């Protein structure tokens, strides 16, 4: 009888422990799984689905800003590969809404401002003639991101990337982008995210753009 | 051992029934479709408050597992289709769900009221002129009014500045700055020479030009409303320097944490430019102007915004004109103009459903000068307050209610003779947009005004109905009644003249996608109670009509790096007003107008080149030798203007070099004729110069992007 009680008590305890452990881990495991998928995502549809996933996580983990950040990032990337301007707008608007929700959870975060600047720049690019104001808004957001965390490479990289794809006559081009990308590269080499799941993307794209810039130099 | 097993089974059963997730896994599958039953791919499906969820595939199918039990909320949403939720009961079994998203589609698919209106701004698409469009339209010289003259419905202004819309005079178009009337939007005018607009196109984030049937939120314009909404907080601190063949400008914008201050100063002098181009005007003193501008914008709370705009300018000019009744005797005209405009506004959101807006403006304009040996002077001041509240209801519907109070004072003098008057105008308005689904919208509006000067009320109903036929095609109908005060020059002379009025009837069809815009609009305008001058004085017996068709086509795709629009207007109008002896077609109404505007970016030389061709059929003029009033017509008008904007960097600062030439071919355009009283002598009214040239350089400091 003693054994029975012991056994059942242990079983019950195991179940309870497992259950509570799972409830706590769920956020972490959900994020780990989603980030794993993000690392392998290639197709626009992958990013949309991941955007949904991160948003689902963020909606439940209401004290976390990173899921919403990734949700925004995924929708932005999905939007960039859309062909239709209306579709692009839908994705970018969604991304901006998510960035703003993330901002509400954590004010004055360099990463969030950097992503905001990226999103606004992409919104501008859909209809530059009517959206010139977004250029300076994007610049202001990136400026704020740099100011909030001078060691964060992403605002430099995003600004460099924006500049890279801006026509030369508007002050863009590979040549103008190069110093920014170089600054970003230095920062990428030393940057360590301080929070768990905090973003750490862009290093490869930065290297790629720098190489492109070097190619145009030699031409 | 058997008893152990019994206990274990018992425990197991207990745990399962209590919803323990250790063993229970429920598989949820299903499809997400829209109202038409078409699958929605990439929809997000998840259980509220959990980390369990997935997305649908391209066939709308989804599947996921959850360990949750009991009643749960399943939420589902998709980009462009809105979101919804449903309660589900999880009991360890698998379940199949058919989820439907009921089309809370993105705004792009929703019908909008555009009848009679050309809109532009950050969030609008299609038929529009952006600030950049205004600045780069050849022949417009960055003048808002001149650029809008290239749109259908609006006439090319000849010897008088302003917007002449669908047979209406310039006085029938009013400009609104953040909801408030700008009483004097034009610079000082010399006789028979069009004046430029005072408004800088880059100040506005959104402009809506209505050529008829405009909203009940605005009044005091029989023909047209130009609704300008100023920009919000500038994002950055920048400075700007402009050097032009006609003057210089300096500006600085300082951005603080939640506010911004902007100071600009301008000095214009047309003498150097006029000395290079042969002038058809005998200037005694070429126009010279000083202008100072101060703007302050501040964020209030989370979503509130306060705006202050103030501008003061002074200008002088003098010229010798021909005196038709004294051949050989020149007629001297001089003008000294002072203009102050203060425009403030505050807007805020009380919550997601209510928005409030209030504003006050003051526009004081003074002119004085000589006409030969006679001295004249005019003072005009207009103080206005406005308040409105907007309620958003349903999915897209909107209700606006508000009021205005305006106090006007006008005085004029001729040598020692002086007269002046003051009047008060109060207005109330209400307007609602009712959406019936996404494809139908009905706008109902009413506006009522009371003038204490004549102790009269007016009631102006407005209606518009739009139907979205397909994603790119839309049809609309509109009706509206419009009132305006008699012009100051009449009211100052005589008090008992009532409101002038017009009724508009419009129908249009519009095709719109990202690259092409096509619109055709037919209208009929019925004018009544227009002010008429008789030997006994003024009365409201004037009347008239205008009818026509406007066509607009813009194409931003067919030509790589090119953008062009073509507008054509046909206008048939007659009116009996002012000092007309009978109904006649006024000189400001050409039967056929055509504008073709082309812009092309040439990457190789970092330049945008543009050309505008304008055609207007002959306009009427008064020939005293012809017994029929306004029966003679001038020859047709042609103008080809070109411009080049070269984008570069000077001292590492973004710089635009701008060059424009008006009437490149030097066509001798005649606006009309002036006759001596006896009808023997006549003189053609011509533009100030056969051609005009403008060169400018704009340097923006602290910003390597285009526009500050």
Image: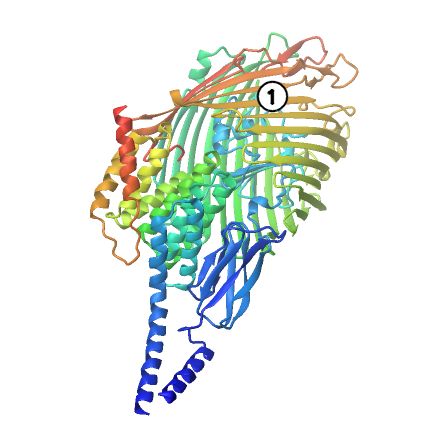
Q: How is the image coloured?
A: rainbow
| Residue lying at 38% horizontally and 40% vertically, measured from the top left | A136
Label 1 neighbour load within 10 Å: few <14, some 14-19, many 20+: many
Residue B187 lies, in percent from the top left, at: 52, 28
Residue B327 lies, in percent from the top left, at: 63, 8
Residue A168 lies, in percent from the top left, at: 35, 28
Q: Which residue is mark 1?
A: B158
Q: Nearer the viewer, residue B50 or B381?
A: B50
Q: Residue furthest front?
A: B2
Q: Quadrant of residue B228?
A: top right
Residue B392 seen by the camera = yes
Task: Judge left or right: residue B154 versus residue B253.
Answer: right
Residue B329 lies, in percent from the top left, at: 59, 10
Vertical placement of residue B136 versus A71, above or below: above
The chain that hosts pointer 1 is: B
Helix, strand or loop at label 1? It is loop
């Amino acid at each position: 009888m003693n054994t029975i009680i012991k056994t059942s008590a242990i079983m019950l305890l195991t179940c309870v422990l497992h259950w509570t452990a799972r409830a706590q881990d769920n956020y972490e495991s959900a994020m780990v799984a989603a980030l794993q998928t993000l690392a392998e995502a290639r197709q626009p549809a992958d990013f949309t689905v991941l955007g949904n996933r991160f948003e689902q996580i963020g909606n439940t983990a209401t004290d976390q800003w990173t899921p919403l950040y990734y949700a925004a990032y995924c929708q932005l990337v999905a939007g960039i590969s859309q062909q239709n301007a209306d579709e692009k707008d839908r994705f970018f608007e969604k991304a901006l809404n998510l960035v703003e929700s993330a901002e509400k959870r954590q004010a004055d975060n360099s990463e969030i401002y950097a992503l905001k600047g990226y999103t606004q720049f992409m919104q501008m690019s859909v209809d530059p003639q009517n959206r010139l104001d977004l250029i300076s808004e994007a610049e202001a957001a990136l400026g704020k991101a740099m100011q909030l965390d001078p060691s964060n490479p992403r605002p430099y990289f995003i600004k460099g990337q924006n500049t890279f794809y801006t026509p030369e006559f508007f002050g863009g081009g590979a040549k103008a982008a190069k110093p920014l990308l170089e600054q970003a590269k230095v920062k990428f080499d030393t940057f360590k995210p301080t929070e768990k799941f905090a973003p750490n993307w862009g290093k490869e794209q930065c290297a790629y753009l720098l190489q492109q810039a070097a190619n145009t130099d030699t031409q | 051992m058997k008893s152990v097993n019994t206990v274990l089974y018992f425990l197991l059963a207990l745990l399962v029934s209590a919803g323990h997730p250790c063993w229970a896994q429920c598989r949820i599958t299903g499809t997400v479709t829209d109202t038409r039953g078409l699958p929605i791919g990439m929809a997000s499906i998840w259980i509220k408050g959990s980390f369990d969820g997935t997305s649908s595939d391209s066939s709308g199918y989804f599947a996921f597992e959850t360990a949750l039990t009991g009643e749960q909320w399943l939420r589902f949403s998709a980009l462009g289709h809105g979101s919804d939720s449903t309660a589900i009961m999880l009991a360890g079994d698998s379940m199949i769900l058919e989820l439907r998203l009921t089309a809370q589609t993105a705004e792009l698919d929703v019908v909008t009221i555009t009848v009679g209106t050309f809109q532009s701004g950050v969030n609008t698409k299609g038929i529009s002129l952006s600030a950049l469009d205004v600045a780069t339209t050849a022949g417009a010289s960055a003048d808002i009014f001149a650029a809008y003259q290239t749109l259908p419905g609006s006439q090319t202004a000849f010897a008088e500045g302003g917007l002449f819309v669908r047979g209406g005079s310039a006085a029938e178009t009013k400009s609104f700055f953040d909801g408030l009337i700008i009483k004097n939007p034009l610079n000082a005018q010399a006789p028979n020479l069009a004046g430029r607009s005072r408004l800088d196109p880059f100040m506005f984030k959104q402009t809506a030009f209505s050529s008829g049937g405009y909203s009940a939120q605005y009044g005091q314009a029989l023909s047209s409303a130009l609704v300008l909404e100023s920009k919000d907080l500038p994002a950055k601190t920048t400075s700007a320097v402009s050097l032009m063949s006609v003057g210089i400008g300096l500006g600085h914008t300082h951005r603080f944490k939640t506010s911004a201050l902007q100071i600009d100063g301008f000095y214009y002098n047309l003498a150097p430019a006029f000395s290079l181009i042969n002038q058809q005007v005998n200037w005694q003193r070429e126009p010279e102007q000083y202008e100072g501008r101060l703007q302050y914008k501040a964020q209030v709370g989370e979503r509130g915004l306060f705006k202050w705009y103030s501008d003061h300018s002074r200008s002088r000019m003098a010229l010798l004109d021909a005196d038709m009744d004294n051949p050989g005797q020149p007629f001297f005209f001089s003008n000294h103009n002072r203009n102050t405009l203060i425009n403030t506004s505050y807007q805020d959101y009380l919550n997601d459903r209510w928005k409030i807006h209030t504003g006050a403006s003051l526009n004081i304009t003074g002119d004085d000068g000589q006409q030969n040996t006679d001295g004249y002077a005019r003072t005009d001041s207009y103080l206005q307050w406005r308040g409105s509240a907007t309620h958003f209801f349903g999915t897209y519907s909107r209700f606006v209610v508000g009021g205005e109070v305006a106090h006007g004072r006008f005085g004029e003098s001729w040598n020692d003779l002086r007269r002046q008057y003051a009047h008060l105008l109060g207005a109330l308005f209400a307007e609602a947009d009712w959406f019936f689904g996404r494809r139908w919208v009905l706008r109902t509006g009413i506006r009522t005004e009371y003038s204490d000067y004549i102790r009269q009320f007016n009631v102006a109903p407005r209606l518009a109905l739009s139907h979205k036929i397909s994603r790119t095609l839309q049809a609309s109908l509109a009706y509206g009644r419009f009132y305006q005060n008699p012009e100051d020059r009449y009211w100052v002379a005589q008090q008992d003249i009532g409101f002038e009025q017009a009724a508009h009837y419009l129908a249009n069809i519009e095709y719109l996608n990202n690259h092409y815009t096509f619109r055709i609009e037919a209208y009929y305008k019925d004018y009544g109670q227009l002010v008429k001058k008789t030997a006994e004085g003024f009365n409201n017996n004037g009347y008239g009509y205008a009818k026509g068709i406007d066509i607009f086509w813009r194409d931003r795709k067919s030509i790589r790096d090119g953008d062009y629009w073509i507008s054509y207007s046909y206008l048939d109008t007659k009116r009996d007003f002012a000092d007309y002896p009978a109904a006649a077609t006024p000189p400001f109404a050409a039967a056929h107008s055509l504008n073709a505007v082309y812009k092309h970016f040439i990457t190789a030389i970092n330049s945008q080149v543009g050309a505008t061709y304008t055609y207007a059929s002959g306009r009427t003029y008064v020939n005293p030798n012809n017994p029929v009033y306004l029966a003679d017509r001038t020859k047709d008008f042609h103008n080809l203007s070109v411009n080049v904007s070269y984008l570069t960097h000077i001292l590492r600062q973004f710089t635009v070099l701008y060059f424009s030439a008006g009437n490149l071919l030097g066509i001798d355009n005649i606006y009309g004729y002036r006759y001596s009283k006896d009808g023997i002598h006549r003189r053609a009214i011509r533009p100030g110069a056969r051609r005009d040239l403008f060169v400018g350089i704009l340097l923006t400091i602290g910003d390597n992007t285009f526009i500050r």
